Amino acid sequence: MEKACGLHCTKINNISVKIGNEEILKNINIHIHCGELTVIIGKNGAGKTTLLKAILGEIEHTGNIVFMDQKDNITKKIKIGYVPQSINIEKHMPTTVYDMFASCITHIPVFLKKDKKIYNEIKEHLKIFGADMLIDKSIGDLSGGELQRVLIAIATKPVPNLLILDEPVSGIDRNGIKNFYNIINKLKSEYDMSIILVSHDLELTKKYADKVILLDKEVIKEGKTEDVFKSLEFKNRFEELL
C-alpha cells in the first residue's frame, strides 16, 4: 500500500511540565505524521516518560495535543492507543486474553457467559497480530512477546490516530523483537497510523525509526535517524556509547 503521509498528523504544541519550581519539560513541539514511526530517545531524566504522561493527560501540563485531518482541514478529537512498558501480572493468573480484551471494549462483566459475537470479533482482531491462538490462554502464562502482541491488539481497537509505546521490547527475546517490529511496519503501512515509541535501545532505533526525537527536557534535535545520530547534540549526550 502506498504511504499516505501528509493526509493527517498529530501536533504536540508547546507542552511544558513543572513540578514545584522545577521545569521537567520545556516547550515541546513535535509533529507526528501518519504512516511513520517516531522514536523518542534521551538519557535517564530527560523527560521521556513525563512527555508520554502529558500526552495521555495523566499529569498537569500547559500546551495541547491536536489531531489534524489535512484532507478536510479539520481539527478532531484525538484517539490514543497506549501500551505501557510493563503491567503487573501474577504468574498463572486465571484471567484469559479474552477476559481482559472484552473488559476493555465492552461493559459486559467478564464473569458472565462469553458473548460469541464479541469472542469472534476479538479473535479476528488478534489475528492481525498473530495472536488469535492466545485468546483462551491465561494472561499470567503468556511470554513477554505474546503479552506485548495482546497489549498492542487491545490498544488498537478501535483504531487510534496515535499509538504510544513505552519501551515496548524490554525483556523480549530477539525473535519477539523481530515480530514486534513486523507488526509496527504493518500498522504504519496498512492502517496509516502515527506511532510514538520511547526507547533506550539505540541500535533498534537506528534500524527501525523513520524519525528520531532527541529529548533533554526540550527537543534538542529531531529529524532522520542518520542526521540525529551524527549530530553534535547526540554525541554530547551519548559520548560513552560511541
Image: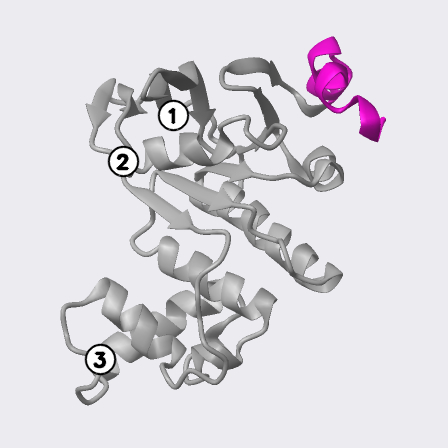
Image coordinates for residue 44, horizontal then vertical, percent: 60, 33
- Residue 239 visible to the viewer: yes
Residue type for callout 3: Val
Quote the CA–CA distance across marks 3 and 1.
36 Å
Residue identifier under label 1: 9
Residue identifier under label 2: 57
Q: Residue at x 52, y 42 (%)?
A: 189
| Magenta-colored stretch includes residue 112 | no
Q: In this rendering, is residue 152 above or below 31?
A: below
Q: In this view, which residue lies farthest toward the right?
A: 242
Q: What's drawn in magenta, residue-wise?
A: 226-242
Residue identifier under label 3: 110
Magenta stretch: dominant secondary structure? helix
Q: Residues within 10 Å of mark 3 (few under 14, many from 20)?
A: some
Local secondary structure at mark 3: loop
Q: Residue at x 36, y 81 (%)?
A: 95
Among numbered discs 3 and 1, the one appearing first in the sequence: 1
- Residue 13 visible to the viewer: no
Among numbered discs 3 and 2, the one appearing first in the sequence: 2
Image coordinates for residue 142, horizontal then vertical, percent: 53, 76
